[in-house]
Structure formats: C-alpha cells, structure tokens
C-alpha cells in the first residue's frame, strides 16, 4: 500500500472494515460524501478532509468525480451533504 | 391420499427416504440461514432507506466475513471530523 520511489511516497487507500468485499464502489461514494461533508463543516485544509480527498481520489473513477462535482455545482447532487 | 413417507410411521417402511430428507433439511435450513443473514447483516442492505442511508457505517469496528485471518477486531482508518 505504501511505496517509495526516488524519495516520493506513493500511497493508496487503506483497507476499511466497512467495505470488506471486492466491490469497493461504496468506499468510493462514502469517501466522496465524507470529503464534501467535512469540507462543509471544517474547511478544505483540515487534515481529515485531506484524508478523505486522497481516499476518494484513489478509489473513485475520475469520470465519477467529475460528474459528481458538476452535479454539486449545479445543485442537483442526490447525496445528503 | 397422502404420499407414503410423509409421516413418521410410513417413513419406517420406506427407510431409503431418510437420507433424502436429511440432505434436503440441511440444504433448506442452510439456504434459509444464509438468505436471512444477507438480509439482516449485510453492510450494504438497509431496511429503512430514508432513515439509514449508509448501513455500512455500523461496521466501522465489526467484521462481516465468516472467517477472518486477523484475531483482533478491525478498526476503520477513516478519521472523524
């Protein structure tokens, strides 16, 4: 999960007991939701928010993130932020 | 007329049916148990989609899998905010 190449630490999302199965779709969605909620409460620079941002960016397909961000901008995101 | 073998008395005359009933019993109760477990315990199943939108949040420190290689209970790495 952690790899060091030329002094740069590469890291992916850690294993989470909430999502024990191979299908990690909900890990992606939950992390994205948590990032948006955290950003709303604490602001983007808070450590936990940065954690959720990293996790959702590693797990989610970029197309989904783009789509959800457009939905949030246009005020039609179905999730509860 | 009732089928022979459906009561305890007639089953004594048709002993060869006993293994069939035994195997069917195991199969049916196993299927019933597993379906009930999927419905009640699965982290991705919610019975109140309005009230409980994220059923997997209850599994932050619990295991869902039948068999786990680690002995200590799992801990979700997600921080609080």
Image (cartoon, grey):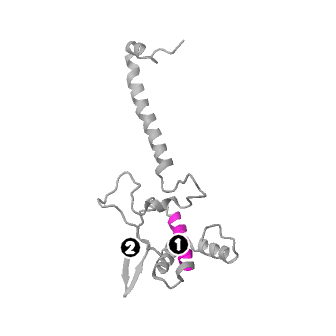
The quarter of the picture where residue A2 lies is: bottom left
Mark 2, chain letter? A
Label 2 to label 1, Cα distance in Å? 22 Å
Residue B37 lies, in percent from the top left, at 46, 46
Residue located beneath label 1 in the image: A34
> CB of mark 2 within 8 Å of CB of mark 1?
no
Q: What range of the chain is rendered magenta?
A: A25-39
Horizontal side of A27 relative to B74 (left or right) equals right
- Taking the magenta stretch, the answer to whether it contains residue B46 is no
Assign the C terminus of chain A to one quadrant of the image.
bottom right
- Taking the magenta stretch, the answer to whether it contains residue A32 is yes
Q: Residues within 10 Å of mark 2 (few under 14, many from 20)?
A: few
Residue located beneath label 2 in the image: A1
Assign the N terminus of chain A to one quadrant of the image.
bottom left
Q: Are marks 2 and 1 on the same chain?
A: yes
Q: Is residue B18 above or below residue A11?
A: above
Horizontal side of B75 relative to B81 (left or right) equals left
View extreme (left): residue: B71
Mark closer to the chain start, 2 or 1: 2
Image depth: mark 2 or mark 1 in front: 1
Residue A49 lies, in percent from the top left, at 50, 79
């Amino acid at each position: 999960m952690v790899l060091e190449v030329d002094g740069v630490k590469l890291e992916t999302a850690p294993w989470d007991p909430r999502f024990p199965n191979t299908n990690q779709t909900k890990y992606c969605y939950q992390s994205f939701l948590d990032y948006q909620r955290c950003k709303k409460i604490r602001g983007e620079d808070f450590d936990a928010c940065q954690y959720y941002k990293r996790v959702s960016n590693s797990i989610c397909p970029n197309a989904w993130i783009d789509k959800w961000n457009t939905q949030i901008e246009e005020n039609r995101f179905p999730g509860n932020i | 007329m009732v089928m022979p073998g459906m009561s305890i008395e007639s089953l004594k005359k048709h002993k060869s049916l006993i293994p069939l009933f035994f195997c069917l019993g195991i199969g049916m109760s196993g299927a019933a148990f597993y379906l009930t477990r999927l419905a009640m315990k699965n982290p991705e199943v919610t019975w109140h989609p309005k009230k409980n939108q994220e059923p997997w949040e209850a599994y932050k420190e619990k295991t869902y899998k039948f068999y786990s290689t680690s002995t200590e209970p799992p801990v979700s790495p997600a921080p609080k905010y």
